[in-house]
Amino acid sequence: MPSSVQTANRTHSCGELRIGNVGETVTLSGWVQVSRDMNHFAFVDLRDRYGITQVIFPKDDADAEVLKRYEAAKALGREFVIKVTGKVVERSNKNKNRETGDIEIVADKLDVLNAASTPPFKIEEPTDAQEETRMRYRYLDIRRNPIKDALLLRNKVTRCVREYLGDLEFCEIETPVLIKSTPEGARDFVVPSRMNPGQFYALPQSPQTFKQLLMVGGMDRYFQIVKCFRDEELRADRQPEFTQIDCEMSFVSQDDVLALFEGLIRHIFKNIVGHEFPPFQRMEYSEAMDRFGIDKPDLRFDMELVELTEVAKGKNFKMFDDAEFVVGMTCKGIGTWSGKKVKELEKKATGQEVGASALVYLKIGADGSYDCSAKKFFGEEDCKKWVEKANAKPGGCGPGDLLLVIAGAKLKTQEQMGKFRHLLGTELGLRKEGFRALWVVNFPMLEWDEDEERFTAKHHPFTSPWTEDIETMVSLDKKDPKLQDVRANAYDMVINGVEVGGGSVRIFERSLQEKVFEVLGFSKEEALAQFGFLMGAFEYGAPPHAGLAFGLDRLCTILGGKATIRDFIAFPKNNMGRDTMINSPSAITSAQLEELSIDTTVDQEGNKKSATGGYPKAA
């Protein structure tokens, strides 16, 4: 049976031949991984996407043609592209670490298809290059197994998605990339319109309104594997352009959505890594914050938050007495750490990543003794009360443990301890193994923006509030703190402490959408100018609908066990949003700027221009 990759230049791939192929004459094409002269023969490890096969070029008892091939093989450099024809033979010294290790090819013909310059780093794992160099030569980095395998895993995931959703009558529909800019949410990437001078498109942060319009259009079940764009600060799990598995359904409830897409994730994990999830836990947002201080808890380890407000106040310790909320967290088995190591924890707690104002610790010795960093204010009986509270949490708190305590405004302090929990969970090696998934449901509809001094949508303004909370939402003043209690019919899927997907039941009635815009501080004119097209559509029989979107890049990172999404993106940007391989972004010509009727306030080196000059020119 012919190989599935057979072409004019090869009969098989470099990862395909086995002991059953011995005696066959084959042709392989690929890149030279290694070329060595062993005096009696030369050998080449020939590599392609599928694997590596050893090729032998004999020297002893050879005629002139065989010697010529031997000399040509000796001259091969790393990453030369070659084609080899020869006979498959059984290897005398088998390589058990290679799938083709039982055989080798004795070459009858060698063609150099393309010579190669010496690459700037080794195409192997581990390599000798820093990430900056590998990103500059990303096309070479893709040849290495870690990046190649990451991209192949991504391909398997997208195939699983299309297979699963296609079988459930979902339609894959593309939505526009050049859309309208809106001020809500993250910062847009904008594109000037040459045909409409002074006006701009935005690149979509998500296809949100379009997928809702597809439901109004009666498409019933939609999905799309789609590029999205956000101009925000970058980190290991963020890129300016990223990919979503975007989905929407009509005539569904929250339970319908959660059940169907839990099934999708089960299908993906079973097919890609062989993991079978138990039924996903459903946790209220409020419970997640109280227990873990974060709306995306990692359930693979304990270290739950314990409120100490009642037993910590009233001891003339200003940090606690002035605080709304005092919270602790037990770290098992590190109560014997030195003062120096504990001080390092204090730096982490008060650093930029966590942001606590200060950290108090209580060491519980192996003999049950207490050593508190605020011992001037808290005696043995006080410490005992702290430990009793902490001991009621999963994992407990006892001899040999360390209790860490911070204080402040409730929500802010919970969030700080939640970040600290994830940070320490990673540092203590508690976040390495396995998979734990859950749904976090019923988020707050609104959150207070300190800078703008108004409430904003926690998810987006198209999320439906729970029916029983609508009256509360519309009756309160737009700055009333009780608006924080209004619940959204929203949900996030969390795996291993990472939000891999999120969505909501949508508003589908114009009157309710107008009320939500009003609560968010939109005037009627502003709401119509930005979203009139959607509210207008709701007047023509919009069905109840709901949906969600998964972050494909993050999902692949979890499946592949990596720390950064960059490995799973063929051509990623660095932390400054630059593609160093193609040197993008870059300046455009004056002629292009003039054609677009725009100018910049800085020159090509990023320096401020003088006040004179600039486009557009007077007619």
Image: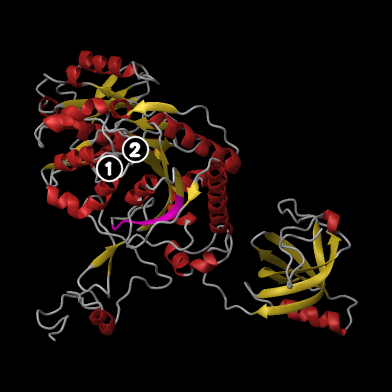
Magenta segment includes 227: yes
Which is more N-terminal, label 1 or label 2? 1
In this rendering, is residue 156 above or below 581?
A: above
Q: Nearer the viewer, residue 320 or 24?
A: 24
Q: Nearer the viewer, residue 216 or 369?
A: 216
In magenta, the rendered stretch is: 224-231
Whether residue 41 sits left or right of residue 382 in the image: it is right
In this rendering, is residue 239 above or below 392?
A: below
Q: Residue 252: image x %, image y %?
A: 41, 33
Q: Residue 193: image x %, image y %?
A: 27, 71
Residue 44, by quadrant, is bottom right
Q: Quadrant of the C terminus?
A: bottom left
User: Callout 1: helix, strand or loop?
Assistant: loop
Q: What residue is pinned by disc 2?
A: 504
Magenta segment includes 19: no
Q: What residue is pinned by disc 1?
A: 462
